[in-house]
Amino acid sequence: MNTPNARAPRAVIADDEPNLSRYLGERLAVLWPELEIAGIAANGPEAKALIAEENPDIAFLDIRMPGISGLDVARDLAGIHVVFVTAFDQHAVEAFERSAVDYLLKPVGDERLAATVARLKRRVSLPPLPAMAPGIAEALALLRLHLPTLAAGGAPGERLAWIRAAVGSQVRLISVDDVCYFEANDKYTSVFTCDGEALIRTPLKELLAQLDPERFWQIHRGTIVNVAHVAATTRDLAGRVRVKLKGRPEALAVSRACAHLFRQM
């Protein structure tokens, strides 16, 4: 919690498309009014100079910029929380090797940006991040210290922040904030977001152990729901509870053993 004399968090934005950086600044002003935008850079060298001059808490970096890429700008940053913003999702894994707090795909919607803001608010209260050591092995080691595991199946006790899931022939990184619910599906687990369905191989029981219990509730033997995506609950004449979700057409059955979770709804 911030004290009355605590300095407001400060951020810089770096993007070679002025309209996009202006738009991001405007949406951040709405979603996080306390955040001060210390400056906007139009390319990689400007971003490095701006960060050195302003020493911000947060840097929103486009990955493909003239002069120096956002990934290279982030390489030597210490104590700064980095969010990569780009139209090219093939850079996702390398972005996280740079200990990114988040990774936003253009165009950035308010719901997705709000999830990033929530994550940043939690991070700015933590001790500063160390400088990124050279080499992928060292980068991943530091990543594991400061971010929950990127894919289902991480070490016990870790809280998942990202899931590597199959969508058709592609593999996507999905933020758990965007997951509406998980459902057991034969040898796989289905991951449902507002945009569709993906598959992971992690069993539901193993997945549950890695999710934040404050946010993800097992409502049935084969279903885990993200409480943030619950819009309403209904009860039929027999007392059976069903959960309606934001952004999904289906309603989820709640087992009698789990119905107590929704007594206050």
Image: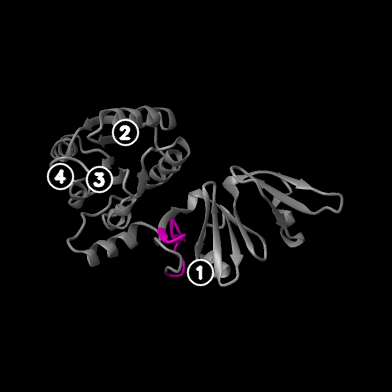
Marks 2 and 3: which is nearer the front? 3
Pick whichever of labels 1 and 3 is earlier in the sequence: 3
To which residue does mark 1 refer? 202
- For marks 3 and 4, the one nearer the N-term is 3
Residue receiving disc 4: 68
Residue at coordinates 60% horizontally, 42% vertically from top-left?
Answer: 246
Of 111 and 249, the residue lying toward us: 249
The span from disc 1 to disc 4 (Cα, nearest Å) is 38 Å
- Amino acid on which disc 3 is placed: Ile
Question: Which of the 4 quarters of the picture holds residue 40?
Answer: top left
In percent of width and height, residue 107 lies at 38, 37
Q: Residue placed at 28% from the left, 63% from the top?
A: 140
Secondary element under disc 3, as helix, strand or loop, is loop
Q: Please, what is the three-letter code of the amino acid marked with disc 4? A: Ile
Identify the residue under disc 2: 7
Determine which residue is flagged by label 3: 63
